[in-house]
Amino acid sequence: MGMAIYHGKLLDAFFIRPFYKMMLGKKITLFDMESVDNAYYNSLIYIKDNDPEDLELTFAVDDCVFGETQTIELIENGREVRVTEANKEEYIEAVVNWRFVKRVEKQMEQILRGLHEVVPTNLLRIFDANEMELLMCGLQKIDVKDWKAHTVYKGGYGPSSQVIHNFWKCILSFDNEMRARVLQFVSGTSRVPMNGFRELYGSNGPQKFTIESFNRLDLPPYQTFSELKQKLCTAIENSEIFSGVD
């Protein structure tokens, strides 16, 4: 991996966004969970938005290791600590940290050790997670016709809706890099499956690009093409801050 970056070679590989964040020493948040495991993400969002005391959760999770279920304590004596309204944010942060960091800590240490022998940490940290993916895996040629053919519309939208017409007009006006960044913003990766958009996957299997679930763009009914393009570009350029297009 380090040699590929050093020599400017691209990897034919797919890594989840939290992997790039770990490479860069950036904090992984709850919202990074959405592109990896949408069902788990929604369960944590439910806890975040509601009083969790009736769920009888503790600061411990079950993990399957080589076919054997083990209980992992997220904090000291976690099995004895109930999740309450007062500590639920701490619980969510601990779960996310366990899912993405603690479970693979030893393996990631070795990956980073090898990587940093070739590419110094300070050089990597000038990139964000999106830029790191493009640096390592490059850009594919994005077929807008295929993308459009395998897009699902919800929330009252259809292929003939004016805002949808403006969206695709906007996509066609972008160069390939900007199209990749739109895809990356919505689906978590700029990579298109080998057999095209019909094989785009979410956390629960095949899941088409949807305008209104993961692989989803929540698109307000902007009145004009210029307003839609400006809002979309702003969201993409600030994708480390925005979680959707408002």
Image (cartoon, rainbow, N blue to C red):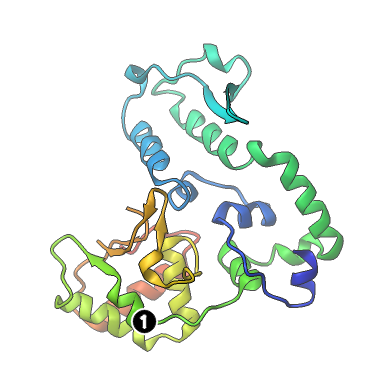
Q: Is residue 184 above or below residue 140?
A: above
Residue in the picture at 65% in, 72% down: 135
Outermost residue to the top: 80
Of residue 220 and residue 35, the one placed in the foreground of this image is 35
Q: Residue 179: name its quadrant.
A: bottom left
Residue in the picture at 25% in, 82% down: 225
Residue 227 in view in this figure: no
x and y percentages locating residue 153 in the rendered image: 21, 66
Q: Residue 149: name its quadrant.
A: bottom left
42 relative position to 99: left or right: left
Of residue 100 and residue 26, the one placed in the foreground of this image is 100
- The C terminus - image quarter: bottom left
What amino acid does circle 1 point to?
Val
Outermost residue to the right: 117
Q: Can you identify the residue that label 1 sits on? A: 144
Residue 231 in view in this figure: yes
23 relative position to 163: left or right: right
228 relative position to 32: left or right: left
- The N terminus - image quarter: bottom right
Disc 1: CA contacts within 10 A as few (<14), some (14-19) or many (>=20): some
x and y percentages locating residue 228 in the rendered image: 28, 76
x and y percentages locating residue 140 in the rendered image: 52, 78
